[in-house]
Image: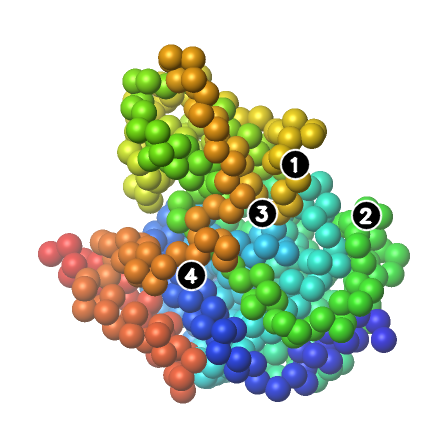
Amino acid sequence: MAFIDALSEWIATEPPLKREPAVLRAREAFADIAGCLLAGAADEAPQRVLAAVRSWGSGPASVVGEAEGLAAPWAALVNGTAAHALDFDDNFHPQAGHATAAMAPALLALGEEREASGFAVLDAYIAGLEALGRISEGLGLAHYERGWHSTSTLGAIGVAAACARLLGLDVARTRAAISIGFSTAAGSKLQFGTMAKPMHAGLAACHGVMAARLAETGVTATHDPLEPAWGLCDLFGAGSSPGFQGLEARLGRPLAIEEFGLKTKVHPNCASAHAAIDGVLDLRAEHGFENKDIDRVETVIHTVGCGNLRYGDPKTELEARFSMPYAIALALLYGRLTLADFRPEAVRRPEVRAWYPRIHVRPPEPNSALMQIEPAHEPAEAIVHLRNGRSLRKVVTYAKGVPERPMSDDERATKLADCAAGVLDRGALKTLKTVLDRLDSLDRVDTFTRLLRFKKDVAARAAS
């Protein structure tokens, strides 16, 4: 049996995914993305996307901050862009991308349209992560290393599988949805630092909804989009993909969400900088130096991360999210990175910019300890050179927020509250948290999504 056949059969026929560890992680992921949606909805990128799609068709699917709904694909496009606009959303290890920012908006939009239950949406999300995780393993990391933005390429395919699960498609139509999703796979990391980057998550969400809906109506596609010549691995893997042999036996054993979990972000910027930020803060906590004692700071990360963090002198908040000097300067000056640090006026602060010549990023030496750590974990070495001649070093294998160093429940609640600040008043935030805690027991998922519709009105009341 080809892997695509095994995967399609698993998506279409696997009994409801009710294992508590999986459901708990799915609820946590939706709570995290709810905060990212609230914080990101007013960003310029989703607002411009909304202006473009508003006339394309109204519908039952909620758009965060808007009273009127849109057709499911367009709501998924806008909300997916909002979810990823601030780069505060989670990462999924096998994909090396942002799974939830694409998958959750798609499933919520489609779930509203079909009056799905909260559990049905979470079940489809867990199944979609399974498809995304195993396809990503078969393709391998070389896809991302070559410059493809896997949030949009692999994301569209994974979202299509998740939406097929939510629609209850049979095996043949599930396979067609995945194949149609493959036909929409596109997106380069060249867009990092522009509005197109967060829109990649929106496009993956939109394309996944469309692929599943097209398959539902009987649109067909090539039987196997993954393994043959001109398929996913051939085109995107360039001959270096591990392949899918044996992966069919691993479907659901354990589930990908249980095996890999999700990397919840502590800092609202590119994850390639996070381990280095943690390392610098750890060194200061351990050794007690002050900023006046520092001569310069070196950060050592894998080559892929160096490429992601391409802006040494960021001019905009979009570029600042992909700048190691900006991230480390914030850590040294303020001890943390906040959403407010990624606004246009914040990027121009002279006290931050003064640090740039003294903060450097480079790849590791070929035989260094850092090279022995899997690049997808995005480890880093932070080196603080003091004016007295001492050099302090710290290797951080796992950034705070990854499954190996998870955020606590209190830290997750604080992040949600920070994202909702100025958007929801206390009462509305309490209601939202209550609904998120019982998302899997909701008869209809719009009990949750409609809480996000009137953000602007609630924000005005909170301000007054």
Mark 3 or mark 4, earlier in chain: 4
Q: First in sequence, mark 1 or 2: give its number.
A: 2
Callouts 2 and 3 close, C-beta under 8 Å: no
Label 2 vs label 3, nearer the camera? 3
Please determine whether, in this image, residue 48 is positioned above or below residue 450.
above
Identify the residue under disc 1: 371
Q: Which mark is residue 377?
A: 3
Q: Residue at x 18, y 69 (%)?
A: 427
Residue at horizontal 59%, vertical 55%?
93
Labels 2 and 3: the sequence-earlier one: 2
The residue that appears at 57% across and 34% down in the rendered structure is: 301
> Where is mark 2, residue-wise?
240
Q: Are marks 3 and 4 in contact (CB under 8 Å)?
A: no
> How far apart are the two marked residues, 3 and 1, measured between alpha carbons?
11 Å
Q: Earlier in the sequence, mark 4 or mark 1?
A: 4
The Cα atoms of the two marked residues, 3 and 4, are separated by 21 Å
Q: Taking 431 as reference, is 442 above or below it?
A: below
First of labels 3, 1 by sequence position: 1
Residue 95 x/y as whole percent: 63, 55
Instruction: Give the amino acid at mark 2.
Output: Ser
Give the residue at the far left of this rendering: 464
Q: Amino acid at mark 3?
A: His
Left or right side of 284 for 46:
right
From the top left corner, tell me how far across and down residue 445 is, in percent: 41, 79
Q: Secondary structure at mark 2?
A: loop
Mark 4 sits on what residue?
A: 33
- In the rendered image, the quadrant that contains the C terminus is bottom left
